[in-house]
Image (spheres, rainbow, N blue to C red):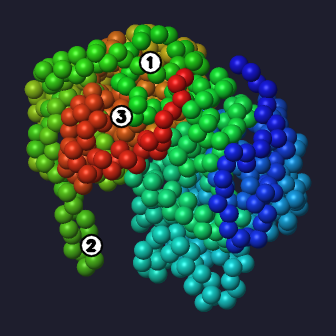
Amino acid sequence: MSDSPVTAVDLNQDTDVLVHDSHNVDPNKPLVEIRDLAIGFTTQGGVVEALKGVSFDIFPGETVAIVGESGSGKSTTAHGIINLLPENGKITGGSVKFEGKDLAHAKKSELYKVRGRDIGFVPQDPMSNLNPVWSVGFQVREAVKANGLATNKKDVNARAIEVLKEAGLADAERRMAQYPHQFSGGMRQRVLIGIGLAANPKLLIADEPTSALDVTVQRVILDHLEALTRERNTALLLITHDLGLAAERATKLIVMYQGKIVEAGPSLKILQDPQHPYTKRLIASAPSLASQRISGTHVDHVGGEEAGIDVADLAAKHERAKANQAATPVVEVKDLTKIYSIRKGNFKSEPLRAVDNISFKIPKGSTLALVGESGSGKTTAAKMVLGLEKPTSGDIFLDGTNLAGASRSELFKVRRKMQPVFQDPYGSLDPQRSIGAIIGEPLKVHKVGDNASRDARIKELLDQVSLPTAVAKRYPNELSGGQRQRVAIARALALKPEIVVLDEAVSALDVLVQAQILQLLADLQSDLDLTYLFITHDLAVVRVVADEIAVMEQGKIVESGTADEIFSNAQTEYTQKLLEAIPGAGIEWGDV
């Protein structure tokens, strides 16, 4: 693979940029000029180069997206522009000129004047970037004061309310008194976007602004962000690992790999005719509506460097779907309902139907995907299948045994047959235990074998998920996100279950690692005849993993069928809305 850097990228070629005069800037002159930017991080092993001579321009009013896998340097580039790096990070070379001023070597006092006022920033995770003990209003008022948008208390409060209204939050006055935990993910992200745009900046940097949101909320947020930046002629630098989103939203695309720019230019041109091998790998790995169901390949992927999605033969896929429909279900859910009692004012409570009378079947060796927006009830349904929540009514049959009224001892025995893999590979693994201990824990809890046989099983499981045996002695913080998710899968397989419940198991992973994990799941399903219940809001992923799909809205299953039926001929308006909201759904991707 060529590693020659792309230098002095002129991203304004072949593109029309809508420019207003709200910022009184020259549309033909770069707003930001980055030249040979190098950033290093001091570690125990010495200085690690994170950026190696990055160069590109951003012009007034245009949207530029930086894409690449985790560790490629895209977020480091964003933080480097405003010199907002961790304590161990330092700009070691190059320049970042904003309106002719070099921010890379500016004094702190000069940077304070630019940050927030001229360059806004929207961070990735709204829950960790909004203080949970302060009201939303207090945090917005602090931003207003810090940016010098108002001085007296009355004006500060008025501007803060205006900021929330501009961000698209209804009833902004009442929302000011609420706390972040009382907001949905989309509402919290709107607050951060409002703060980022509060001072009408000339450049807004958005670092994975919608990665934690479902597709319909994501679309609303991005539409609003696009409208606000267009109105104000604000340039937008979008950091994302979602190629579909980048293609749909950005005029220009920068592809980063190992701290360097390997390809840059107009978005559609790159996605339809990629030149660099790494860009081709990214596009080949990205699931889309044009993808087909992947199949097990039985290929050794140790290290995971070159794993990608193998497309199953269409005829074989249709035959498998027919066989699945005729097979005896290993899981059958009948009329399942879960009602929560939600406390309101004056100690009154109201019933909330999280899951409302749903039914589905999963034939052995197949994958059923439960899809829907946040709050649709899909995760609650999965928890009831796993026995982590008790149903209000209805039945859950596993190999003919009803779990709905099962005792704790009966559920304990059942859990040997059914295991979960959760969304967050960072939060679901105990940081104080070794990988070997984590994988072997289910064996110990269920008193399977002695120490020697457990150690042998742990080695076997590491081999099954394509991790070297030496990983057993390491700890979660020493592994990448993709490696951690492989460990979570190995732990789920320890007891040789028949069913694996995957709750957003790949949503936190970048596109290349996601492709590797999806292929691994397909290989394991083929090798071990596993049955999957796959919970996700990402319909592009569903396209490549599911045999059957059940679409949930407000606790109900509103549509179900084979993957081909749902994607080619969705019947309900809600399902059609979900499909239309997938980033890049209408774009013709390049043949790689």
Q: Quadrant of the N terminus?
A: top right
The residue that disc 1 covers is: 310
> Which sits in the foreground, 43 or 96?
96
Classify residue 39 by image quadrant. Answer: top right
> Which sits in the foreground, 329 or 16?
16
The residue that disc 3 covers is: 542
The mark that comes first in sequence, 3 or 2, is 2
What distance separates the C-alpha of mark 3 from that of mark 1? 15 Å
The mark that comes first in sequence, 3 or 1, is 1
Where residue 427 sits: x, y (%)?
48, 41
Whether residue 28 sits left or right of residue 241 in the image: it is: right
| Amino acid residing under circle 3 | Val
* SS label for mark 3: helix
**Mark 3 or 2, which is nearer the eye?**
3
Q: Residues within 10 Å of mark 2 (few under 14, many from 20)?
A: few
Where residue 567 sits: x, y (%)?
30, 36
What distance separates the C-alpha of mark 1 from that of mark 2? 51 Å
What distance separates the C-alpha of mark 3 from that of mark 2? 37 Å
| Amino acid residing under circle 2 | Lys
Task: Give the residue drawn at x 58%, y 84%.
Answer: 157
| Amino acid residing under circle 1 | Asp
Work out whether 477 lies above or below 92. above
Classify residue 183 by image quadrant. Answer: bottom left
Residue 221 in sight here: yes
Task: Give the residue drawn at x 68%, y 68%.
Answer: 20
The residue that disc 2 covers is: 344
* SS label for mark 2: loop
**Mark 1 or 2, which is nearer the eye?**
1
